[in-house]
Image: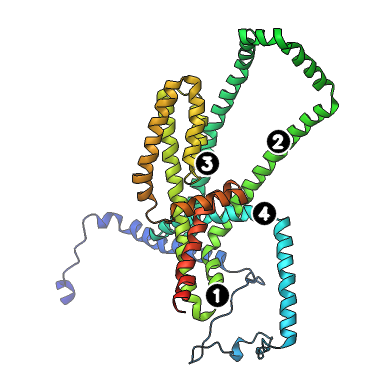
């Protein structure tokens, strides 16, 4: 009776019609998930006999109760415990270290003098890596992994440069072709001018030019010089492309290994001074990165304003001149003035009124940039006095050319920071 009196379970709407297939489907889903998990575990399982790649790592830091480095038996990798240091006053120690120091100095000088191009590439790559590091860290703060942040930042840089040149090169080719096409008319107009006719009647300029051209064509050394110049230009272009590739690859490596490089550098400092060295180094690298990003923004704004102004005034070769303005704007303090002079000289071909209007508008923009744009963009970058900045830019340009002028102000800021925090503090204690 009880069995007959128990209430029967009420089926949910639509459950009686699809109970069989739904149960089969729900049962197959865990089975498929389990198979996929098993396959993924097998793929991730190391190959039998394979070992991890050997990596050179810093030894772990161990301290005693007094805070000094101690040797533990478990740290022994077959090399034994370090013995006592030789006295620095020992004659053998003094003579050996002095000789080794002189030899190392001569070796470093020889290597540096014979690998100047490589050193320049390394400096340029490190400068680019320090400039992109704030972007990568900003992406890391947005939960983007560092490898993905490096790939995004470098890809954006490469695409921006490639897009810029892809837009610029056709315009330059078109404008150069226009110059070549109009050159015969300019020469013909000059030969038909009254000035040339009077000079030819008095000094025989036409006959003199014809004679010199015949000598030049018949001279094998002159023709060889032209051929050598063409070959030299081609080799220069090839070296430039190869150098750009090397700098890009080194920038990737430096950007990926920058945290490890910093840790290695900090471990080279004495333990008691390591926190101070780390703080100073972080301040220097942060200032360099902020300076690079800020200078890029300032140069782009400068070039955009110059291009818009040249387009409105009808100054020829505006795209090419905007590219020149962008490059010169990377040189602090004097780059804007040099760019202004170059564009004004070209603007004179369109009339002195055009040149005057451009000069007034561009110099007004330089003042606006100096007092309103640069202070806001460079507020987290370096702060260097004007006289020191000018001297450092001139010295850097004399030593390393354009690259030296670019890194002159960050280098001067780093030296001033070290003098302020290390040398002056030490002098105040005495």
The residue identified by callout 4 is: 118
What is the secondary structure assignment of the residue under circle 2? helix
Q: Which mark is residue 233?
A: 2
The residue identified by callout 3 is: 161
User: Is residue 405 placed above or below 219 in the rendered structure?
Assistant: below
328 and 386: which is toward the camera? 386
Of mark 3 and mark 4, the one earlier in the sequence is 4
The residue identified by callout 1 is: 267
Of mark 2 and mark 4, the one earlier in the sequence is 4
Q: Residue at x 70, y 64 (%)?
A: 108
The quarter of the picture where residue 256 lies is bottom right
Q: Is residue 155 left or right of residue 214?
A: left
Q: CA distance from mark 3 to mark 2?
A: 22 Å
Q: Residues within 10 Å of mark 4 (few under 14, many from 20)?
A: some
What is the secondary structure assignment of the residue under circle 3? helix
What is the secondary structure assignment of the residue under circle 4? helix
Tell me if I can see residue 1 in this picture. no
Of mark 3 and mark 1, the one earlier in the sequence is 3
Q: Residues within 10 Å of mark 2 (few under 14, many from 20)?
A: few
Q: Nearer the viewer, mark 3 or mark 1?
A: 1
279 and 63: which is toward the camera? 279
Cβ–Cβ below 8 Å for labels 2 and 4?
A: no
315 and 248: which is toward the camera? 315
Cβ–Cβ below 8 Å for labels 1 and 2?
A: no
Cβ–Cβ below 8 Å for labels 3 and 4?
A: no
Q: CA distance from mark 4 to mark 1?
A: 26 Å
| Percent coordinates x, y for residue 339 in the rendering | 49, 36
User: Is residue 188 placed above or below 320 in the rendered structure?
Assistant: above
| Percent coordinates x, y for residue 19 in the rendering | 30, 58
């Amino acid at each position: 009776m009880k069995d007959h009196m128990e209430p029967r379970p009420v089926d949910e709407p639509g459950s009686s019609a699809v109970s069989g297939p739904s149960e089969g489907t729900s049962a197959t889903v865990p089975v498929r998930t389990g198979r996929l998990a098993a396959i993924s575990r097998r793929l991730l399982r190391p190959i039998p006999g394979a070992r991890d790649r050997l990596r050179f790592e810093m030894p772990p830091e161990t301290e005693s109760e007094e805070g000094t480095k101690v040797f533990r038996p478990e740290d022994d990798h077959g090399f034994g415990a370090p013995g006592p240091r030789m006295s620095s006053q020992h004659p053998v120690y003094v003579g050996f270290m002095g000789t080794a120091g002189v030899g190392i100095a001569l070796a470093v000088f020889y290597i540096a003098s014979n690998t100047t191009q490589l050193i320049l590439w390394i400096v340029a790559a490190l400068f680019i890596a320090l400039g992109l590091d704030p972007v990568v860290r900003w992406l890391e703060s947005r939960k983007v992994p560092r490898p993905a942040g490096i790939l995004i930042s470098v890809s954006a840089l490469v695409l921006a440069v490639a897009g810029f040149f892809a837009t610029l090169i056709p315009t330059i080719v078109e404008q150069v072709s226009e110059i070549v096409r109009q050159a015969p008319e300019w020469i013909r107009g000059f030969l038909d001018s009254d000035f040339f006719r009077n000079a030819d009647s008095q000094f025989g300029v036409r006959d003199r030019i014809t004679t010199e051209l015949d000598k030049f064509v018949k001279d094998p050394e002159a023709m060889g010089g032209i051929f050598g110049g063409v070959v030299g230009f081609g080799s220069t272009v090839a070296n430039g492309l190869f150098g750009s590739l090397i700098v890009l690859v080194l920038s990737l490596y430096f950007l990926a290994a920058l945290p490890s490089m910093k840790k290695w550098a900090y471990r080279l400092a004495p333990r008691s001074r390591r926190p101070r060295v780390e703080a100073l180094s972080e301040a220097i690298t942060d200032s360099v990165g902020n300076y690079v990003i800020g200078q890029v923004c300032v140069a782009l704004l400068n070039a955009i304003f110059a291009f818009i102004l040249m387009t409105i005034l009808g100054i020829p070769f505006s795209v090419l001149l905007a590219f020149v303005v962008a490059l010169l704007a990377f040189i602090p303090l004097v780059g804007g003035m040099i760019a202004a002079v170059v564009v004004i000289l070209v603007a004179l071909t369109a009339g002195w009124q055009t040149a005057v209007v451009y000069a007034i508008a561009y110099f007004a923009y330089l003042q606006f940039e100096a007092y309103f744009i640069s202070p806001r963009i460079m507020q987290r970058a370096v702060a260097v006095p004007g006289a020191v900045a000018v001297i450092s830019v001139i010295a850097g340009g004399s030593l390393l050319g354009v690259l030296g002028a670019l890194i002159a102000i960050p280098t001067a800021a780093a030296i001033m920071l070290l003098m302020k925090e290390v040398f002056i503090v030490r002098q105040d204690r005495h």
